[in-house]
Image: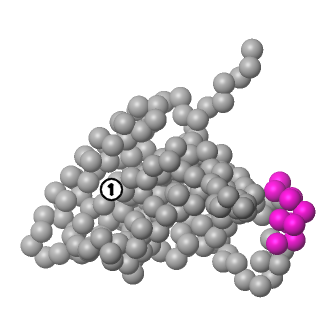
């Protein structure tokens, strides 16, 4: 009998402050809810603050281009891209920093953006190659920002289109550093929203 492949959820933890992180509380709620809803699924966790990934420079670009020219996608350099491409669902938990997110997340995205693994282009245009049906983006924001200034959302939404991920969801706790607002209630409401959404993700 052919073995049924377990669906994988890739969790990308960018919570720099670790246990003190308020974004991590949203992530904990998401993982608990998804595990309760789908106990059969396999979860893979990446904690970016502990990985110390390197951005692409002249030397690493030259090495990568050489591997791509040979279509050597099995090389260890592309492990993160293969892992991302094979995930059935993706969670990104990252605080809102400088209108977007911590730089380490951009470095990670550089490492998973691999022509021939996560996307490809031809005369018809751009084609995403990722298996994931959804991306869930969890964040906390100290202030309250207009849509135009929330570059984390616009970037990750565009990334889903780039990689062929069908749906993008963002849950944020907004204004949690504004004096006079009930930050614990704001966070509790975002946690409740996260749990409710996770019950609908397949």
| Above or below for 168 versus 153 | above
Residue at point 24%, 66% (across, down): 174
Q: How many C-alpha atoms fall within 10 Å of the one at disc 1: few (<14), some, or many (≥20)? A: some
Q: Outermost residue, top direction? A: 1
Report if residue 136 lies within the magenta region: no
Side of 161 where 169 appears, left or right: left
Could you say which quadrant of the image residue 184 lies in?
A: bottom left
Residue at 27% x, 48% y is 193
Q: Taking 106 as reference, is 180 left or right?
A: left
Write down the region rendered in magenta. Answer: 65-74
- Residue identifier under label 1: 171
Q: Nearer the viewer, residue 63 or 164?
A: 164
108 lies above or below 189: below
Q: Residue at the location (30% across, 71% down)?
A: 147
Residue 164, how many percent across, how many down?
57, 52
| Residue 148 x, y percent position in the rendering | 32, 75
């Amino acid at each position: 009998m052919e073995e049924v492949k377990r669906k994988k959820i890739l969790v990308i933890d960018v919570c720099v402050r670790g246990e003190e992180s308020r974004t991590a509380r949203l992530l904990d709620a998401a993982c608990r809810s998804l595990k309760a809803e789908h106990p059969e699924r396999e979860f893979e966790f990446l904690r970016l603050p502990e990985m110390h990934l390197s951005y692409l420079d002249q030397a690493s670009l030259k090495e990568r281009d050489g591997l791509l020219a040979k279509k050597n996608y099995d090389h260890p350099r592309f492990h993160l891209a293969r892992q991302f491409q094979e995930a059935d669902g993706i969670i990104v938990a990252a605080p809102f920093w400088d209108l977007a997110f911590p730089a380490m997340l951009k470095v990670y995205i550089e490492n998973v953006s691999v022509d021939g693994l996560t996307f490809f282009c031809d005369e018809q245009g751009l084609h995403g190659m990722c298996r994931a049906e959804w991306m869930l983006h969890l964040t906390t924001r100290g202030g309250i920002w207009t849509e135009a200034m929330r570059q984390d959302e616009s970037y990750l939404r565009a990334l889903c289109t780039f990689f062929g991920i069908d749906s993008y969801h963002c849950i944020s706790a907004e204004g949690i550093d504004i004096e006079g607002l009930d930050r614990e209630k704001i966070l509790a409401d975002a946690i409740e929203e996260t749990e409710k959404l996770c019950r609908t993700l397949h």
